[in-house]
Image (spheres, helix red, strand yellow):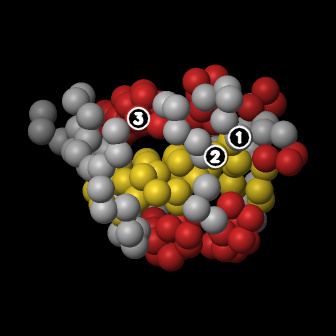
Amino acid sequence: MNRLTRLDKLFFRLEAQHICLEWVFREISGRPGIVFEMGLGHGRTYDHLRTYLPERDIYVFDREVDCFDDCIPPDDRLILGDIAETLAAAATRFGGQVVLAHSDLGSYDEPHNVAMTAKLNRRLPAVLAPGAIVLSDLPLELSGTRALPLPAGVRDGRYFLYRNGPHAHG
């Protein structure tokens, strides 16, 4: 069978996300900066981030809270609203401080994905620190960043990695 089922696609996306997160944890180790989690969803990735990056300030962005009770971020780290508006406001407060931005805002609706990509492309670069890493479930075109090769074990098209700035760090 050549066609990937929806279960295959979900599995490969979660596998890619997990491998990319492991890679980025090593990549940002010892570097100052905060973490943005864009798309709380059920809170699974936020739980993973706070477990593996306990020393980091993690700010979570979403339209609403609809997650496991034990995965709700503290009120002072939860930013609710439309991502274009909340990222624009975050640029004033956090400009140039984000060392890791994880975006999980994609859906099965192509017009939604196009809109999310446009919002992120426009607003995300302003918060990124030099050398920051962006992980995304959607392909992005972020000003000032360049695409990175995926870590071993990640299937093409399942996750996307970017680094802010023209030069490699580390």
Q: Which of these two is toward me, 102 or 170? A: 170
Who's the residue at 41% across and 35% down the image? Answer: 27
Q: Secondary structure at mark 2?
A: strand
Instruction: From the viewer's perspective, tell me whether residue 31 is left or right of residue 68.
Output: left
Classed neighbour count for the residue bearing mark 3: other residues with Cα under 10 Å, few (<14), some (14–19), many (≥20): some
Q: Earlier in the sequence, mark 1 or mark 3?
A: 3
Return the mark for residue 151.
Answer: none
Residue 79 position within the rendered picture, expressed as x and y whole percent measured from the top left: 77, 56
Q: CA distance from mark 2 to mark 1?
A: 5 Å
Mark 1 and mark 3 in contact? Answer it, CB < 8 Å. Answer: no
Residues under labels 3 and 2: Cα distance? 14 Å
Secondary element at image label 1 = loop
Q: Amino acid at mark 1?
A: Asp
Give the answer, above or below, for where 97 lies relative to 26.
below
Circle 1 residues within 10 Å: few <14, some 14–19, many ≥20:
some
Residue 108 in view (yes/no): no
Disc 3 designates what residue?
Answer: 27
Query: Sequence-wise, which precedes: disc 2 or disc 1?
Result: 2
Disc 1 designates what residue?
57
Q: Which residue is mark 2?
A: 34
Q: Are marks 2 and 1 in contact (CB under 8 Å)?
A: yes
Using the rendered image of the protein, determine whether residue 58 is visible from the camera's viewpoint. yes
Q: Amino acid at mark 2?
A: Ile
Q: Quadrant of residue 53?
A: top right
Task: Report the residue that reaches farthest toward the top.
Answer: 51
First reached walking from the N terminus: tag 3 or tag 2:
3
Q: Percent x, y for residue 56? A: 66, 35
At 38% from the left edge and 31% from the top edge, which residue is drawn? Answer: 23
Q: Is residue 4 left or right of residue 163?
A: left
* Quadrant where the N terminus is found in the figure: top left
State which quarter of the image contains the C terminus: top left
x and y percentages locating residue 168 in the rendered image? 30, 49
